[in-house]
C-alpha cells in the first residue's frame, strides 16, 4: 500500500475530488486544449494575462486522478505569477516527476507540487501529471490551439 | 442466429484439468511483480509464449538460420523447408483449401492493409461503398478510410446495440449494389462480442459481395474454419495465439488473390526482373516481398502444434467458465459497469468504475501484480458509442485461474479503498 499512498497522496486525492478553478472562463486571453491520446485525458486550460502576469487561470475537462489533481494544483500555484515564474515552476515540476533528484531546498521550493514526487516511480503516468502543465505552457508561450502528449 | 464456432464434442472434465495444468508451460507467468505473483490478464493485447515456442525459435537460430527460397546450400534448403512446413500447418489450422492461399505478413494490421490496397486497387471505384462494423479495431477502419479517400468511395458502418451486438437487420439494409467489400471483426477486442460471421458472410455472398474477417481475437479462443465460414479473407496474428510478435497471416480465396496486384515490390515476389518489365511470382510469394520473419514463422509453427495438442474446444470451455466467474464477481463491486454484454462473448471483460478513471484502476492493479489494459483499446468509436473516454479490460487465456480472478477482484476493492 505504501507505494500507492506515495502516488495517491492526500493532496492529490483532495484535488481530484474537489478540483480548484475547475470552470470555463468566458473572457480568457488564451484557451488551449490538451489531449493525451493514450488514455483519453482531455483538458482545456484558460488563462487571463495582463502584460506578462497570469491574473486568472482555470481548466475544465476529464481524465484520471493524477492529471486532474495536477491541473488543479497547477491552477492554484500559477495564479498571480508572471509567465516566467510559471515556466520555472513547470521546469521544477517536470524534473520532479521525471525523477531527477532535487536537493532539500528544491523540495521546499516545490511546496504542494512535492505531492507529485511519487509519479516518478510510475513512468506510464508522467504524461498524466504533465498534461495540464504542457497545456499551460502552450497557452502562455505559443500560438497552438491544441497540445498532445504524443 | 448462427451459433459459432461449430461445436465439436464437449471437452471432458479430464481435458479441462489437463489444459488448466498447462500453465506451467509458460515461464513468464512464474514471476513476481511488485512483490506479488503476476496475474496476467492482458491476453487480448498479446498472449504469453509456451516454452516449446521459445525453444523452437532458439533452435532455429542455433541450427538452421539461413535465408529462404534463395540458396542452394544445405542450411537454406533446411530453412526453406521448415518455413514452408509452417505454411502447411497454418493451412490445416484454419482448414484452407490450398497452401497458396496462406500469405505470411507482419500481423493482422498488415494483412488488412494488403487487402485494402491490392483488392481496392482493382475493385473499388468512385461512388463505391465499403462496409465495416461499429466495433472495429482501428486497424480495420483506417486502411479502408485511406482507400476510400484515394478512390473517392464511402465508408459505411454497421451499427450495434447497447449490449455490443451488431444489428443484423441494419446490416442487410446497408448491403447495396455499390458495396464492394464487407470488413468485420470475428471477436471484438474491446467488447468481447463474438459476431455471427458465417451469417454475415452468407448475407453478403447472396449479393455477390466478398467479406474480410479480422480474426486476431478469435484464433486463440476457438476453432476457425475458413471454408465453413466461407469468408473471402481472414486475417490474424501469431502473437495473440501464443506465438511470437511480428508474424501475421492473411488467408484469401485463390480467385481473389490471383487477380489482385502485388502489395509491395522486392525480392521473392518476382519471377524475372528487367528494367522494362517484371514478371511477378505465383501465389503466395507474389505478396511476400523481401526476407520474411523466418524465425517468427518457425515460432508460429510451434504455437500451432501446441494448440493442436491442447485442444481448442477445451480452451474455449475453460475460458468461458473463467469469464462467467469473473463477471459474477465483478458485479458485486459497487459502481462497476460492464461494457459489452453480448450473448455470445469471448474471454474479454471490459468495465468502468464510477468516478474512477480506468488509468488509475490500471496503476493500482499493477501495484497489486495484476496486469490489465486500460485505455481506448484502439477502438475509439466503440468508446464514443458507450460514452466513456476509456475502459479497463481484463482478458483471459486458458492458463489463467479462478484464484487469479480472486486476486483481481481483491485488487479492485483496493482501488475503491484508495480512490473511492
Image (cartoon, coloured by chain):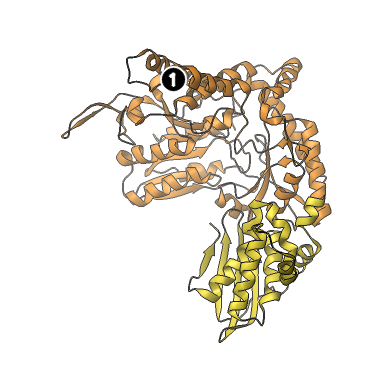
Chain colours: A yellow, B orange
- Residue B240 on image: x %, y %: 57, 32
Is residue A19 visible in the rendered image? The answer is: no
- Residue B407 on image: x %, y %: 80, 38
Q: Residue most toward the top?
A: B74
Name the residue located 61 percent from the left edge and 63 percent from the top edge: A131
- Residue B57 on image: x %, y %: 53, 23
Q: Quadrant of the C terminus of chain B?
A: bottom right
Q: How many marks?
A: 1
Q: Residues within 10 Å of mark 1 (few under 14, many from 20)?
A: many
Q: Position of B337 compared to B308: left or right? A: right
Specify the quadrant of the image occupied by residue B305. Answer: top right
Specify the quadrant of the image occupied by residue B105. Answer: top left
Q: Residue most toward the left?
A: B276
Judge whether B141 appears above or below A44 on screen.
above
Q: Quadrant of the N terminus of chain B?
A: top right
Judge whether B338 appears above or below B297 on screen.
below
Is residue B264 visible in the rendered image? The answer is: yes
Specify the quadrant of the image occupied by residue B104. Answer: top left
- Residue B37 on image: x %, y %: 77, 35
Q: Position of B387 compared to B201: left or right? A: right
Name the residue located 32 percent from the left edge and 21 percent from the top edge: B70
Q: Chain of mark 1?
A: B
Q: Which residue is mark 1?
A: B83
Of B376 and B369, the residue lying toward us:
B369
Q: Secondary structure at mark 1?
A: helix
Of B121 and B302, the residue lying toward us:
B302
Amino acid at each position: 500500500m505504501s507505494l500507492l499512498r506515495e502516488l495517491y497522496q492526500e493532496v492529490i486525492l483532495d484535488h481530484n475530488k474537489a478540483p480548484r478553478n475547475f470552470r470555463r472562463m468566458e473572457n480568457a486571453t488564451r484557451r488551449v486544449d490538451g489531449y493525451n491520446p493514450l488514455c483519453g485525458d482531455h483538458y482545456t486550460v484558460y488563462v487571463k494575462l495582463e502584460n506578462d502576469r497570469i491574473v486568472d487561470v482555470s481548466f475544465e475537462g476529464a481524465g484520471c486522478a493524477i492529471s486532474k489533481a495536477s491541473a488543479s494544483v497547477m491552477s492554484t500555484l500559477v495564479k498571480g505569477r508572471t509567465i516566467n515564474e510559471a515556466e520555472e515552476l513547470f521546469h521544477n515540476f517536470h524534473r520532479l516527476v521525471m525523477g531527477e533528484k532535487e536537493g532539500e531546498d528544491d523540495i521546499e521550493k516545490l511546496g504542494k507540487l512535492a505531492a507529485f514526487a511519487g509519479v516518478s516511480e510510475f513512468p506510464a503516468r508522467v504524461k498524466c501529471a504533465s498534461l495540464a502543465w504542457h497545456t499551460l505552457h502552450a497557452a502562455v508561450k505559443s500560438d497552438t490551439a491544441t497540445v498532445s502528449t504524443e | 442466429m448462427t451459433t459459432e464456432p461449430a461445436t465439436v464434442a464437449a471437452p471432458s472434465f479430464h481435458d479441462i484439468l489437463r489444459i488448466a495444468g498447462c500453465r506451467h508451460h509458460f515461464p513468464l507467468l512464474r514471476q513476481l511483480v511488485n512483490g506479488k505473483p503476476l496475474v496476467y490478464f492482458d491476453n487480448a493485447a498479446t498472449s504469453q509464449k509456451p516454452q516449446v515456442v521459445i525453444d523452437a525459435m532458439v533452435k532455429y537460430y542455433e541450427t538452421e538460420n539461413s535465408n529462404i527460397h534463395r540458396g542452394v546450400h544445405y542450411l537454406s534448403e533446411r530453412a526453406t523447408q521448415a518455413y514452408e512446413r509452417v505454411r502447411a500447418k497454418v493451412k490445416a489450422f484454419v482448414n484452407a483449401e490450398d497452401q497458396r492461399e496462406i500469405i505470411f505478413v507482419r500481423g493482422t494490421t498488415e494483412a488488412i492493409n494488403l487487402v485494402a490496397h491490392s483488392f481496392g486497387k482493382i475493385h473499388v471505384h468512385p461512388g463505391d461503398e465499403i462496409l465495416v462494423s461499429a466495433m472495429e479495431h482501428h486497424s480495420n477502419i483506417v486502411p479502408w478510410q485511406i482507400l476510400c479517400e484515394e478512390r473517392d468511395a464511402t465508408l459505411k458502418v454497421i451499427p450495434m446495440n447497447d449490449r455490443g451486438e451488431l444489428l443484423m437487420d441494419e446490416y442487410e439494409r446497408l448491403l447495396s449494389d455499390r458495396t464492394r467489400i464487407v470488413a468485420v471483426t470475428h471477436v471484438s477486442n474491446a467488447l468481447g462480442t463474438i459476431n455471427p460471421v458465417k451469417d454475415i458472410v452468407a448475407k453478403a455472398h447472396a449479393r455477390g459481395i466478398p467479406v474480410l474477417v479480422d480474426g486476431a481475437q478469435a484464433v486463440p479462443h476457438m476453432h476457425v474454419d475458413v471454408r465453413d465460414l466461407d469468408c473471402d479473407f481472414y486475417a490474424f496474428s501469431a502473437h495473440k495465439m501464443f506465438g511470437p510478435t511480428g508474424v501475421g497471416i492473411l488467408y484469401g480465396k485463390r480467385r481473389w488473390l490471383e487477380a489482385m496486384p502485388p502489395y509491395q515490390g522486392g525480392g521473392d515476389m518476382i519471377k524475372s526482373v528487367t528494367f522494362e518489365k517484371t514478371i511477378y511470382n505465383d501465389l503466395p510469394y507474389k505478396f511476400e516481398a523481401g526476407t520474411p520473419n523466418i524465425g517468427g514463422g518457425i515460432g508460429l509453427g510451434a504455437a500451432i502444434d501446441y494448440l493442436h495438442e491442447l485442444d481448442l474446444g477445451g480452451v474455449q470451455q475453460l475460458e468461458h467458465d473463467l469469464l462467467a466467474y469473473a463477471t459474477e464477481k465483478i458485479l458485486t463491486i459497487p459502481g462497476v459497469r460492464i461494457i459489452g454484454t453480448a450473448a455470445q462473448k469471448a474471454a474479454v471483460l471490459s468495465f468502468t468504475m464510477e468516478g474512477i478513471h480506468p488509468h488509475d484502476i490500471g496503476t493500482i492493479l499493477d501495484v497489486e501484480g495484476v496486469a490489465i489494459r486500460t485505455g481506448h483499446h484502439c477502438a475509439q468509436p466503440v468508446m464514443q458509442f458507450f460514452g466513456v473516454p476509456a475502459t479497463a479490460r481484463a482478458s483471459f487465456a486458458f492458463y489463467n485461474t479462478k484464484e487469479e480472478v480472486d486476486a483481481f477482484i481483491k485488487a479492485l476493492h483496493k482501488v475503491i479503498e484508495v480512490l473511492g
